[in-house]
C-alpha cells in the first residue's frame, strides 16, 4: 500500500508554497506522481450557457484574468517542485470552483493536500469551507496544512485518534504509507468506556495488531478526559511533540452547507500540526 498519485491545491495564496513543498516531499518519499491543480474559479457550467455571452463581453475579460492567475500559480508550482527534485509531476488548470474542482480531481488521486482556512487571507475567505467540503465529499484522505508555522518534516512523530468508528478506520488505513515511514506512532483512545460497543477488552489492541501486520509498531495510550476531545487531542499532540495528527472526519453537507462534528470542527479551526482526515 502506497501513494502513487498525490493531488495538491495550487493557488496564489501565501500558504501555497508550504503546502506544495510538503506534498512534493511526500511524493518524493513515495515515488509518486504529483499533480498541481489550479482552479480558475470559473464554473464549468458557464460554457454551457450561451446567455452569458462570453465572447467580447465584460465576462470574457474577467475570465481572462482568472485564467492568468491560475497560470501564474501553476508556474510557481512548477518552480518549487523542480527545485525540490520531484521526478514525476504535472500542472492542471481546471475551469471550476476550488471545492468542486478538487473533489472531481481527487477521484483519481490517493492523497489530497490543502491548507487550513486562514481568516486573514483573501483567497481563503472566498472559499472558507474548502478543507471541510473536500474532506467530506472527495472519498480520499485529505492532508490539511495549518496556515500558521512551518513544518519541515511532518510525519516523523504521528498521533492517531482511535474510537472504533468507520471514519477512524478509514483515516488510519489511508495513512498507512505515512505511518510506515514515521519514527514514532502513538494511538490515542479517549474515554473508551463511553463506547463499550466499539472496543474489545483492551481498547486499541485490535487496531494496533492490524497495523503491526503492516510493519507499523504503535504505542496505545488510553486517555480519560472531561474536556472536549478535540482540545484534548491537541493537548496530547503538544505533550508528545507530535508533528502530524491522523483522525476520522465527521460531518456531512446539506446542499452547499457544511455541517461538521464537534471534534472535526475544533481540529480544522485550531490545528497546530498537519492533520490527515478521512470521512
Image (spheres, rainbow, N blue to C red):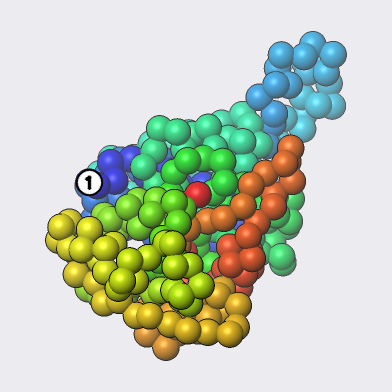
Residue 184 image offset from top left, x and y in percent: 25, 75
- Please say whether residue 149 is visible from this viewpoint: no
Question: Which residue sits at x=67%, y=44%?
Answer: 253
User: Relative to 194, is 68 above or below?
Assistant: above
User: Relative to 99, is 104 above or below?
Assistant: above
44, 160: nearer the viewer: 160
Residue 151 picture quarter: bottom left
Question: Which residue sits at x=29%, y=62%?
Answer: 207
Say left or right for 61 vs 106.
Answer: right
Residue at image mark 1 = 1
User: Relative to 66, is 132 above or below?
Assistant: below
Residue 275 image offset from top left, x and y in percent: 46, 64
Q: Secondary structure at mark 1?
A: loop
- Please say whether residue 49 is visible from this viewpoint: yes
Question: How many badges with numbers are in the image?
Answer: 1
Question: Which residue sits at x=15%, y=57%?
Answer: 213
Say left or right for 191 vs 120.
Answer: left
Residue 222 image offset from top left, x and y in percent: 38, 80
Question: Which residue sits at x=61%, y=36%?
Answer: 100
Say left or right for 193 vs 59.
Answer: left
Say left or right for 44 vs 30.
Answer: right
Amino acid at each position: 500500500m502506497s501513494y502513487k498519485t498525490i493531488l495538491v491545491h495550487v493557488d496564489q495564496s501565501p500558504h501555497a508554497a508550504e503546502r506544495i513543498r510538503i506534498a512534493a516531499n511526500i511524493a518524493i518519499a513515495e515515488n509518486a506522481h504529483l499533480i498541481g491543480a489550479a482552479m480558475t474559479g470559473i464554473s464549468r457550467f458557464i460554457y454551457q450557457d450561451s446567455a452569458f455571452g462570453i465572447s467580447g463581453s465584460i465576462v470574457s475579460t474577467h475570465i481572462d484574468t482568472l485564467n492568468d492567475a491560475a497560470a501564474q500559480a501553476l508556474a510557481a508550482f512548477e518552480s518549487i517542485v523542480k527545485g525540490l527534485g520531484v521526478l514525476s509531476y504535472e500542472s492542471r488548470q481546471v475551469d471550476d470552483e476550488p471545492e468542486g474542482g478538487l473533489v472531481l480531481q481527487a477521484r483519481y488521486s490517493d492523497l489530497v493536500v490543502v491548507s487550513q482556512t486562514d481568516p486573514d487571507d483573501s483567497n481563503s475567505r472566498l472559499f472558507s469551507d474548502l478543507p471541510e467540503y473536500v474532506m467530506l465529499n472527495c472519498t480520499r484522505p485529505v492532508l490539511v496544512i495549518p496556515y500558521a508555522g512551518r513544518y519541515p518534516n511532518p510525519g516523523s512523530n504521528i498521533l492517531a485518534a482511535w474510537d472504533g468508528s468507520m471514519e477512524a478506520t478509514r483515516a488510519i488505513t489511508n495513512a498507512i504509507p505515512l505511518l510506515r515511514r514515521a519514527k514514532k506512532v502513538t494511538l490515542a483512545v479517549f474515554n473508551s468506556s463511553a463506547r463499550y460497543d466499539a472496543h474489545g477488552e483492551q481498547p486499541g489492541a485490535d487496531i494496533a495488531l492490524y497495523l503491526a501486520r503492516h510493519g507499523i509498531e504503535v504505542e496505545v495510550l488510553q486517555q480519560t478526559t472531561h474536556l472536549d476531545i478535540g482540545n484534548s487531542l491537541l493537548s496530547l499532540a503538544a505533550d508528545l511533540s507530535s508533528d502530524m495528527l491522523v483522525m476520522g472526519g465527521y460531518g456531512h453537507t446539506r446542499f452547499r452547507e457544511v455541517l461538521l462534528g464537534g471534534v472535526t470542527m475544533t481540529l480544522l479551526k485550531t490545528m497546530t500540526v498537519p492533520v490527515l482526515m478521512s470521512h
